[in-house]
Image (spheres, rainbow, N blue to C red):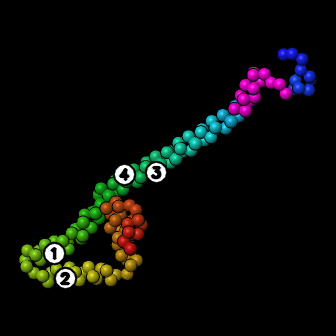
Amino acid sequence: MGYVPINLRLYILREDDYMSIFTALIGPVAGLAKSYLTNKAEEKQAKHQAKMSVIQNDADWESKMADASKDSWKDEFWTIVLAIPIFMVGYAIAANDVTIISRVSAGFAALEDLPEWYQYLLFIAISSSFGVRGVGKIMGMRK
């Protein structure tokens, strides 16, 4: 470099100086980006672990319910109770007795006239005996 007045020398930067300024600016920005990506990865991992925990808890619950109901007759009982109208209608058709079908219809009408809270309790009891979960969702579809 030739003669440059002192006050202008402060503003003249070499190519190496530009690189050091660039790296000084890029370093913190890269650090922020890395920390953001790390946090996102940790958040995704935490969500995955939470989902896996829910799946494991569901499997544990189903296993416990299966163990608890292996000596139980309540699901067989409700299966028989729920099948009775089907057998009665089948018998009515085979025996050509339409009064049985009207009696089955009257029975369903009587069940429909029961208080709503009792219908809900009956539905929950039958659903739980078969191991059906999410009764609230199913009852919401009823309306």
Measure how far apart labels 1 and 4 are at the Cα level: 36 Å
State the mark number for residue 103: 2
Q: Earlier in the sequence, mark 3 or mark 1?
A: 3
Q: Mark 2 belongs to which amino acid?
A: Arg
Q: Mark 1 sits on what residue?
A: 88
Q: Mark 3 sits on what residue?
A: 54
- Closer mark to the observer between disc 4 and disc 2: 2
Q: Earlier in the sequence, mark 4 or mark 2?
A: 4
| Magenta stretch: dominant secondary structure | helix
Q: Which residues are magenta?
A: 11-26
Residue nearest the observer in this picture, 17 or 71: 17
Q: Mark 4 sits on what residue?
A: 63
The answer to whether marks 3 and 2 mark residues whose Cβ atoms lie closer than 8 Å is no
Residue 31 in the magenta stretch? The answer is no
Q: Secondary structure at mark 3?
A: helix
What residue is rendered at 59% in x and 39% in y? 37
Q: Earlier in the sequence, mark 2 or mark 1?
A: 1
